[in-house]
Amino acid sequence: MHSLSRCGYVFTSHLDRILASKAKQSSIFGSILGILSFVLLIWAVEIFNYIFGHPFSNLGIFPRNAWGLPGILFAPFIHHGFEHTITNSISLILLGILISFKNHRIIFKVSLFIIIVGGLGVWIFGRPASHIGASGLIFGYFGFLVARGWYVRDFGSIAISIVTIILYGGMIFGIFPGQSYISWEAHLFGFFAGLLSARIFR
């Protein structure tokens, strides 16, 4: 009887581990699907913009103007052309997957936090221009991934931080003023929003 009970316990424990693993894989897949859907929406907006003469280009962040506030939410979906869209799409997917790999539940909270907090920073302190593109969110993902290794300090988080720095470490120079047509403000405030999100959502 004791042997049967032990066998039953081992079997149910093993089954629980399998189910938990499958549930986690399903959740990670759902997070990645959400990232891909976000990128597809960006492409839909860009194609519509291209066909109809860029009607959405005026929906960016216009600093210190009340009518520019909605751009905080709209700006990440609007880009300057297909080259800009391709570059940001690749980075969004790769960095988004790195975030989901360690903690699949957090990607949507982090994304919304970076968009709002980083966007507000641009609206308050940015140059008087239209700030568009998902670059602020990308820099936020970069800041989050780098800082999470410091705050969480487990092997997985530290390893992902190192991989992020190796792949995207050169991005840090993008937070400084450069070409006039690039919103370094979005990069800067997105990056700081990512660092802060790593602290809040640790």
Image (cartoon, grey):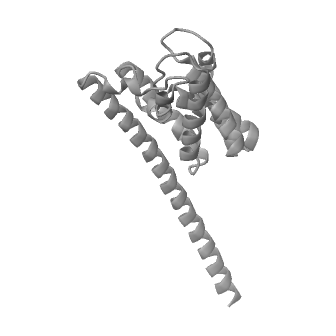
Q: Position of residue 2 (x, y in %)?
A: 70, 87
Closer to the camera, 162 or 174?
174
Pick whichever, 80 or 167, lies toward us: 80
Q: Quadrant of the N terminus?
A: bottom right
Answer above or below: position of 113 versus 2: above
Q: Which residue is drawn at 63% across and 72% down?
A: 13
- Which residue is situated farthest in the bottom direction here? 1
Res 167 seen here = no
Residue at the farthest top position = 179
Q: In which quarter of the image is residue 42?
A: top left
Q: Position of residue 43 (x, y in %)?
A: 34, 32
- x and y, in percent, of residue 66 in the image: 51, 29
Q: Where is residue 146 in the image (x, y as percent from the top left)?
A: 67, 32
Residue 151 versus residue 162 in the image, above or below: below
| Left or right of residue 52, residue 179 in this image | right
* Residue 200, visible in the rendered structure: yes
Residue found farthest to the left: 51
Identify the residue at horizontal 67%, vertical 43% (top origin).
Answer: 156
Residue at 49% x, 23% y is 62
With respect to residue 98, does 80 lie above or below? above
Q: In this view, does 88 lie to the left or right of 52?
A: right
Residue 82 lies in quadrant: top left
Query: In the rendered picture of this protein, how many numbered marks are placed on residues?
Result: 0
Examine the rendered structure and indicate whether residue 119 appears above or below residue 103.
above
